[in-house]
Amino acid sequence: MTRQQIFDKIEVISKKIFGKETIISEATSSSDIEKWDSMNHVVLISTIEKEFAVTFDIMEVIGISKFGDFIDLIEKKQTQCS
Amino acid sequence: MNNIEQEIRNNLYEFYDHIAQIKGIHSEEHDHWSVIRNTPGVWPRIIYKIAPKIVEPKSAILFSEKVKSGTYPEIVIASEENIQQVDPFLRSKGFYPYSAWKGMAISNRTDIKAPYLPEKIEVVKLESSADIKQWIKVVTSQLISPARLEKQLLESLIAQPQIEAFLLKHNGVGVSTILVFNSENSTGLYLIATDKSLQRQGFASLLVQHILFQEFQKSINPIILHATPKGEAVYSKLGFIPLNQFFLYRFLNIHL
């Protein structure tokens, strides 16, 4: 899966969680989205884990602050699997 | 004295234990974890003091039953000790990690001076009803939502000899808060918050410096705190050293 394909899937998920009007980029962080609170953070993590069939390590989770971080981690895990 | 990493944990657990003992606060102490089951929407609601033995079958079943009962808090705090063992357990029970606090400490130093407080700024010990009201307003705006801090709980806390709370005022209005908890071997700083509209102007930093100077005059114990990711840089500049981590989990009760 390419970086763009990963981003597109995450964009769909983010619209489901934060509202369809939400526009994101790789640099978008929790401070840019008002609805990105602790509850929605865990919903986002669990949904992305399920969608991409990956599990983020505890240290990886706490390092996530923007959408680009998710993409980096998913790419890394894809490389490890292939 | 315990080593400082352990003391950072002990101070936090003792602080919550004090809250748990306050009349009217529902709490439970189990062999391998403790819980403050305050009313939903009221701070604090937390599962803490998690021991690695929580994963053992008997404990695990009891913990599951408690979580399924729907009366348990949404937030868990787990120390980094044995986290690799505790993390999969918590996830299997529906708790997902979302943030981490850095345990930080500063030892007593003679070079710490009283900070200069500009004319319009004062630091008051929390006593008057008006100050308590302002203090609560600032703290409540910064708690993990949805949560409010009740006046009765704060009054019960500051009535205890180990606990003091302070409010930094600018032009007579409460801007930053701090609560100081003295345990036997350390002084813990809690509920450091600044009014949302006045953040990033150095008010909390000034208040912490003021308290460092004040507490180091009274005791040789180290001062510890548990910093959010945003707060870590601020406290590092004041001389605090990061020594360990605490992981925050939230119960996932919404699925897409």
Image: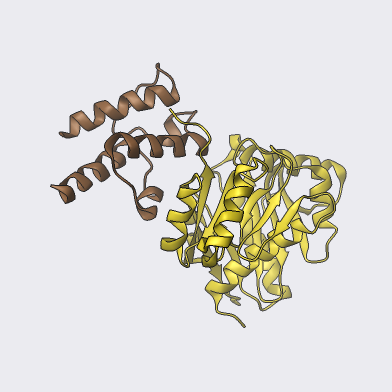
Chain colours: A brown, B yellow
**In the visual, does B24 lie left or right of B12?**
right
* Residue at image location 57% in from the left, 50% down from the top: B64
Asked which quadrant contains residue B117, the reply is bottom right
| Looking at the image, residue B73 lies above or below residue B185 | above
Q: Which residue is more in the foreground, A37 or B48?
A: B48
Q: Position of residue B232 (x, y in %)?
A: 48, 56
Is residue B33 toward the left or the right of residue A78 in the image?
A: right
The number of numbered discs placed on residues in the rendered structure image is 0
Looking at the rendering, in which quadrant would you find the N terminus of chain B?
bottom right
Q: Position of residue A67 (x, y in %)?
A: 32, 36
Q: Residue at x 60, y 64 (%)?
A: B32
Which quarter of the picture shows residue B220? bottom right
Please state, as top left, top right, bottom left or bottom right, where the C terminus of chain B lies in the image: top left
Q: What x and y, as percent, mark residue B110? A: 61, 77
Q: Position of residue A56 (x, y in %)?
A: 34, 48
Please tell me whether residue B129 is drawn above or below residue B22 in the rendered image: above
Q: Is residue B24 visible?
A: yes
